[in-house]
Amino acid sequence: MQQIRKFTTALVLAAMIAGAMMIGTARLEAKGKKGGDPHDAICQYLASVINYPYVTPAVKEYAMSLFKSYECDPALLQ
């Protein structure tokens, strides 16, 4: 039981770090482009994660919550 708790904790921590890196990378890419808006870059990246056909339900749910919290345009999901 203890091993399962340690594994779950490590998995959650890894997911949080990956999410932070994803958002940080999208912001840096948007700043590197002339006239790029970091908000739009994050929204486009989240939409690509959500629309990816092989995304797991947990990752899709997390990306959708971030998509909603950033108040992204729902038209990107189509």
Image (tube, helix red, strand yellow):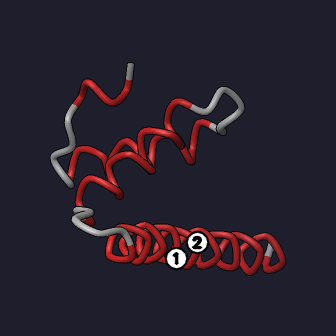
Image point (23%, 44%), residue name: 68
Instruction: Name the element at disc 1.
Output: helix
Circle 2 sits on which residue?
A: 18
Q: Where is residue 75 in the image (x, y as percent from the top left)?
A: 26, 24
Vertical relation: 54 (above or below) 18 = above
Image point (29%, 69%), residue name: 34
Q: Is residue 34 left or right of residue 6?
A: left
Q: Where is residue 45 in the image (x, y as percent from the top left)?
A: 45, 50
Q: Which amino acid does label 2 sit on?
A: Ala
Outermost residue to the top: 78
Vertical relation: 38 (above or below) 17 = above
- Asked if the residue at tag 1 contacts the one at tag 2, i.e. Cβ–Cβ closer than 8 Å, the answer is yes
Q: Which amino acid does label 1 sit on?
A: Met
Outermost residue to the left: 71
Circle 1 sits on which residue?
A: 21
Image point (38%, 45%), residue name: 44
Q: Name the quarter where the C terminus is drawn.
A: top left
